[in-house]
């Protein structure tokens, strides 16, 4: 077990350093975009954003803790345009009247990632984890603020597959927004960056004990 301790600590330190680097160099003041105007390029250029006039359905995917499969880690829900939301509602009404089950194909260019570690797990079973958003959106939609997550693994392949099975169409470079993320204060960000880098250097140095005489 000890052999895995240092790599695990190194990964944690890298995440800490990268988080500090992001907050220091890549997070500017809050930028606001309508759901119809935001794209991946803008989300990379502007890491701290608020997406307005978005709509949610009652469908979402849950990522479970890799060490304890019974504990939810993150919840992913698409934010869609008013036009696509109206199509969703119309299809839902038609299916209820005709007793059919239409497979929708809803474009989802923005995915919101919500921290689920403190979430009441019963909402996963009864499909009500985003009921608060679903009820408050009314005709004007909702606004979601947070920090964009970029890179190839912003959305795990399993989550992509699950959302696709629900009827969502995700572009390869989807915008992923970590809900309600607040960037660290300047001094905290620098502490995370410097502390993470120093910690990584110490870990690396520990692999070469013969060089210290």
Image (spheres, helix red, strand yellow):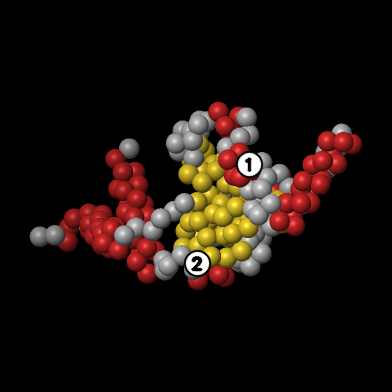
Mark seen at residue 145: none
Q: Label 1's element?
A: helix
Q: Residue furthest front?
A: 139
- Is 140 above or below relative to 133? below
Which residue, given by chain and number where applicable, does mark 2 sit on? 31
Determine which quarter of the picture holds residue 125. top right
**Residue at image x 47%, y 58%?**
147
**Disc 1 or 2, which lies upstream in sequence?**
2
Of marks 1 and 2, the one in the foreground:
1
What is the spatial separation of the Cα atoms under label 1 and label 2, in whole angstroms? 26 Å
Residue 135 located left or right of residue 205? right
For the N terminus, the image quarter is top left
Residue 122 coordinates in the image, percent (x, y): 55, 28
Residue 66 located left or right of residue 196? right
Residue 36 located left or right of residue 25? right
**Residue at image x 58%, y 33%?**
124
The foreground one among 27 and 157 is 27
Mark seen at residue 135: 1
Q: Label 2's element?
A: strand
């Amino acid at each position: 077990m000890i052999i895995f301790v240092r790599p695990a600590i190194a990964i944690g330190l890298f995440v800490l350093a990268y988080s500090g680097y992001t907050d220091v160099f890549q997070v500017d003041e809050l930028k606001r975009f309508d759901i119809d105007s935001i794209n991946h390029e803008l989300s990379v250029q502007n890491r701290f954003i608020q997406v307005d006039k978005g709509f949610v359905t009652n469908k979402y995917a849950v990522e479970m803790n890799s060490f304890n499969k019974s504990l939810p880690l993150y919840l992913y829900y698409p934010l869609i345009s008013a036009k696509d939301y109206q199509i969703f509602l119309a299809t839902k009404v038609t299916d209820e009247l005709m007793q059919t089950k239409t497979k929708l194909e809803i474009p989802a260019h923005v995915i919101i990632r919500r921290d689920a570690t403190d979430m009441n797990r019963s909402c996963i079973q009864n499909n009500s984890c985003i009921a608060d958003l679903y009820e408050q959106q009314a005709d004007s939609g909702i606004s979601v603020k947070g920090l964009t997550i970029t890179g190839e693994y912003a959305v795990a392949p399993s989550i992509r597959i699950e959302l696709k099975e629900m009827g969502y169409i995700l572009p390869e470079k989807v915008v992923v927004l970590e809900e309600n993320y607040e960037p660290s204060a300047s001094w905290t960000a620098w502490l995370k960056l410097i502390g993470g880098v120093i910690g990584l250097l110490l870990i690396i140095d520990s692999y070469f004990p013969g060089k210290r005489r």
